[in-house]
Image: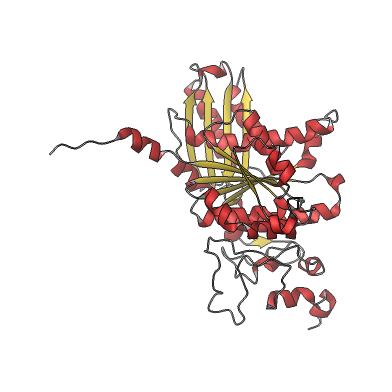
């Protein structure tokens, strides 16, 4: 009996499906920039509470969230409103991310919709089985302390929901020169977000001589926390090594370096004249600075359009894994290493840089879930004497829990208990 194999359909099904979701005003602007620059091989989605801004977006798929909460007028720089808006449309968000192998979530931290809704979108994407990567910006210092505080809390919650988080501080745009106009500065930030998404998506979608596929990317980026992503281009003498140095020394990176990374994706692209020695020099530079036990996945391809240029893309992850595994020693005290997964009630306290100061500041919204992927809603761990609700419940409808009670007691009273 004869049989046939449909190779065309098999090839189509085997291609990784990548979706880029811009959440809030800054995220929507980043999506516009990526479309303008011609990023191929991905699906674009814009999510916002502001109907007018959404109508002006170039994304082929758009979703207005929180119609009952915001009336289509935006979240008013209130993350709790952005969070409630996302909760209102959980099922519609789930439909958008369904079937994706990888989801990029881009947003600006510190506002309302992006800060509040992005963690919800990320949580849904991960529960749908997608490798979820956050690519976000932090506000300028001149935008004020309140916006910076909102951004830090938003980053905390987003970190708990994504596999990997790439952060670009807008303040570092000043390192590029004082002559940037206001419009140029924000455009440059969008370009950095674009480069981050393109650098990763190109690794998956482009076929190379030494190929990097989606499984490789997933190995390096699943459950890895903070990440460094950089791209460098150079030509002339020592071009490959120079490009690698540019990739790991970007002035826009959020104060992290490849030093100590336990997972690295390295992709080198050059013209037909690219030599093996050049590839070795670039790879050696990255290997020297990474953790001695780092898992380094290498890819290389030829692109005749680059001419004399060599392009190096580096994605470094696993910094938080080192912190979790190795004890931290300070000049005053020696602290034991944090466990890889914290109990839900302890996570906000253990991850806080200054617990006493944080206790005096009311959280903007309740932490959705713990670091590891869990379904929504979930039951509290059996060993916890007093269960803590870990559903999507918004802060506006406050409930009693040990965590809430601790936060409500002033620091000076708590210290005397």
Residue 202 lies, with reference to residue 330, above or below; the image says above
User: Which residue is at a point 48% across and 40% down the rendered structure image?
Assistant: 297
Q: Quadrant of residue 19?
A: top right
Tally of numbered discs: 0
Position of the C terminus, as image quadrant, is bottom right
User: Which residue is at a point 65% across and 35% down the rendered structure image?
Assistant: 58
Seen from the viewer's position, the closer of residues 340 and 291 is: 340
336 to the left or right of 281: right
Q: Where residue 358 sits: x, y (%)?
A: 78, 66
Residue 179 lies, with reference to residue 190, above or below; the image says above
Q: Quadrant of residue 22?
A: top right
User: Which residue is at a point 76% across and 62% down the rendered structure image?
Assistant: 364
Q: Quadrant of residue 314?
A: top right
Query: Can residue 13 be seen at all in this image of the molecule?
Result: yes
User: Which residue is at a point 60% across and 82% down the rendered structure image?
Assistant: 385
Query: Can residue 156 be seen at all in this image of the molecule?
Result: no
Residue 288 lies, with reference to residue 117, above or below; the image says above
Seen from the viewer's position, the closer of residues 155 and 397 is: 397
Q: Where residue 140 sits: x, y (%)?
A: 81, 44
What is the basis of the colouring in this image?
A: secondary structure
179 to the left or right of 130: right
Q: Residue furthest left?
A: 1
163 to the left or right of 334: left
Position of the N terminus, as image quadrant, is top left
Q: Where residue 374 sits: x, y (%)?
A: 52, 63
Q: Where residue 98 sits: x, y (%)?
A: 50, 50
Residue 69 lies, with reference to residue 248, above or below; the image says below
């Amino acid at each position: 009996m004869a049989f046939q194999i449909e190779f065309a359909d098999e090839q189509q099904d085997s291609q990784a499906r990548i979706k880029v979701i811009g959440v809030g005003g800054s995220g929507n602007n980043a999506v516009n920039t990526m479309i303008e620059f011609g990023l191929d091989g991905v699906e674009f989605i814009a999510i916002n509470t502001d109907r007018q801004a959404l109508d002006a977006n170039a994304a082929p798929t758009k979703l207005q969230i929180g119609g009952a909460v915001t009336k289509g007028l935006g979240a008013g720089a209130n993350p709790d409103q952005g969070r409630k808006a996302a909760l209102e449309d959980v099922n519609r968000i789930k439909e958008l991310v369904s079937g994706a192998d990888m989801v990029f979530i881009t947003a600006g931290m510190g506002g309302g919709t992006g800060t509040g809704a992005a963690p919800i979108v990320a949580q849904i994407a991960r529960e749908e089985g997608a490798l979820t990567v956050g690519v976000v910006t932090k506000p300028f210092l001149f935008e004020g302390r309140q916006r910076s505080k909102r951004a830090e809390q938003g980053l905390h919650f987003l970190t708990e929901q994504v596999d990997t988080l790439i952060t670009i501080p807008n303040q570092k745009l000043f390192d590029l020169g004082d002559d940037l106009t206001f419009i140029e500065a924000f455009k440059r930030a969008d370009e950095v977000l674009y480069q981050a998404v393109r650098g990763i998506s190109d690794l998956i979608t482009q076929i190379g001589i030494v190929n990097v596929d989606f499984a490789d990317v997933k190995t390096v980026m699943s459950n890895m926390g903070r990440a460094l992503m950089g791209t460098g281009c150079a030509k002339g003498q020592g071009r490959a090594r120079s490009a690698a140095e540019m990739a790991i020394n970007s002035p826009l990176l959020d104060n992290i370096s490849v030093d100590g990374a336990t997972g690295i994706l390295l992709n080198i692209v050059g013209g037909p004249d690219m030599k093996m020695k050049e590839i070795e020099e670039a790879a050696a530079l990255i290997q020297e600075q990474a953790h001695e036990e780092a898992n380094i996945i290498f890819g290389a391809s030829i692109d005749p359009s680059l001419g004399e240029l060599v392009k190096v893309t580096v994605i470094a992850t696993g910094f938080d894994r080192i912190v979790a595994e190795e004890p931290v020693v300070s000049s005053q005290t020696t602290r034991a290493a944090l466990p890889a997964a914290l109990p839900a009630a302890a996570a906000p306290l253990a991850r806080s840089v200054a617990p006493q100061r944080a206790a005096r500041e009311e959280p903007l919204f309740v932490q959705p879930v713990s670091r590891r992927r869990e379904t929504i809603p979930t039951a509290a761990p059996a060993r916890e004497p007093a269960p803590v609700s870990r559903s999507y419940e918004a802060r506006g409808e406050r409930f009693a829990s040990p965590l809430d009670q601790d936060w409500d007691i002033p620091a000076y009273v708590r210290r005397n208990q």
